[in-house]
Amino acid sequence: MSSSQSFECQAKLKFSTKLAYGIGELSGSLPSNILVFFFLFFLTDVVGLNPSLAGLIVMVGKIWDAINDPLIGWLSDHTRSRFGRRYPWMILGAVPLGLSCFLLWTVPPTNNQTLLMVYYTIIALIFYAAFTAVLLPYSALSAELTQDYDERTNLISFRSAFSIGGSIFSLILAELIFFWVDNKQQQYLILGLLAGIIAVIAIYISVWGTYKRYHYVQREPGNHPQSSPLSLWQKLRVILTNFPFLCVMAIYLCSWLSVQTIAAILPYFVINCMQLTEEHFTRMAITVQGTALMMMIVWNFLSHRLGKKAIYLMGIPFTIIAVIGLFLLQPGQVILMYVIAIMAGIGIATAYIVPWSMLPDVVDLDQLKTGERREGIFFALVVQLQKIGIALALFMVGKLLDNAGYIPGSTGQQPDTALWAIRMIIGPLPTLLLIISLVLAYFYPITRQVHQDILLQLYHKK
């Protein structure tokens, strides 16, 4: 078989395989999206926690989550079973993920700030451990199901479509629950329960739908994982000298740190700065995500012609303009607010597609240099840095709101200092991060041609 025939064979992914892989993203997108959009607000305005304590809970959970990433990534790389390296983690972690998702949105029968903090911290630790055990091996599968440059973009587009679709669904679900259920505690309890059930079902569908393809690829010559005498720490040192990987890691960190910071502060902005009801927040978020979902088709099409880096450089400026617009937006400008949401969604779509489709190409480069397939540890390091960054950012959001005099659960006017803090968090900070990500994307070196050369060299080695 010629090298071109081998690449073509590896590139062929059935629609059912891509669909099943995409569905698995619901196991992460539903629980994580309701956490990003509602959890800080839930802790302060429903549970009644001090904003600093609420931010601390989020930070502790995220840092714990980040600590798990390299360990689980390394363990999944070295897992040996008849089900492969990734699937045992996904299968065994699904039920604890769903259960802890439900418990996160349960309000204990106490007003004691210390007891509430202890409860949510413990449940957060359990949730994030299960989340990493499921989602990290799931993410690493994208590098193992195909090695084709464009087919990986297609696969990530399916995953991203379900990520955005899951986000939209979670917001619609939240709006329906908020409309039909009057009690705020019951609203979030039902939302957490449904998200947990769907998460468990989605990951089992993904395992069932991708299992055959995974083992077909692993039977190809040269695709069997090799053992290494290097320790985990030694492997990390080698990986962190990989310049393309450092670019991808920083691009992902900056883009998602900005996006999730905006998501966390958005309910405060809509309710307090724009003086609108909670329904406008969910509609605003749905507008952003719905636009991103539709633009996914456009950006995927352009990626096949222009490349991954080009579409990121084209898309992110739309989001930069949007967040500057939010910073300047005034009460009463509701229509303009939704126009800005559409602009944000245009750019956010590339943040979903590009970093995750770049990362498997970096894994191929590492295999060429070292002879090992280390998808787990690569994906773990990217997610770890992102989680640490978001944990610190959300802690700072809570701290800034607290220092600015934000009044939890207030139905009246917030002080001017709190309103100004909300505007600063939603505007200048994300703008700076997104500009940095554009600079890093410009210098990312693995183009389509470079990746084809990497695969050709790997083929000859095999």
Image (cartoon, rainbow, N blue to C red):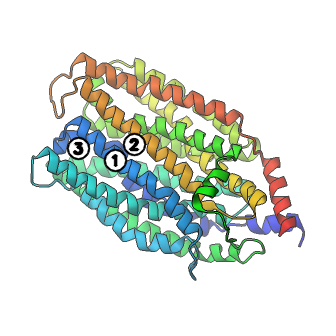
Residue 96's quadrant in the figure? bottom left
Location of mark 3 (residue): 43
Location of mark 2 (residue): 391
**Do the residues bearing badges 2 and 1 touch, measured as CB atoms within 8 Å?**
yes
Foreground residue, 266 or 374? 374
- Name the element at disc 2: helix
Going from the N terminus, do you reach mark 2 or mark 3 first?
3
Tell me the crowding category of disc 3: few under 14, some 14 to 19, or many 20 or more residues within 10 angstroms, Cα based. many
- Name the element at disc 3: helix
Q: Is residue 177 left or right of residue 304?
A: left
Which residue is depicted at the point 15% across and 25% down?
412
Going from the N terminus, do you reach mark 3 or mark 1 first?
3
Question: Three-letter amino acid code at disc 1?
Answer: Val
Please, is residue 309 above or below residue 29 in the view? above
Q: Nearer the viewer, mark 2 or mark 3?
A: 2
Tell me the crowding category of disc 2: few under 14, some 14 to 19, or many 20 or more residues within 10 angstroms, Cα based. many
Give how far apart the Cα atoms at labels 2 and 3 are.
Answer: 15 Å
Q: Position of residue 80 (x, y in %)?
A: 58, 78
Foreground residue, 265 or 384? 384
Quadrant for the N terminus, please: bottom right
Q: Nearer the viewer, mark 3 or mark 1?
A: 1
Going from the N terminus, do you reach mark 2 or mark 1 first?
1
Foreground residue, 401 or 9? 401
Location of mark 1 (residue): 60
Which residue is depicted at the point 35% across and 18% down?
330
Q: Is residue 349 left or right of residue 264?
A: right
Give how far apart the Cα atoms at labels 3 and 1 are.
Answer: 14 Å
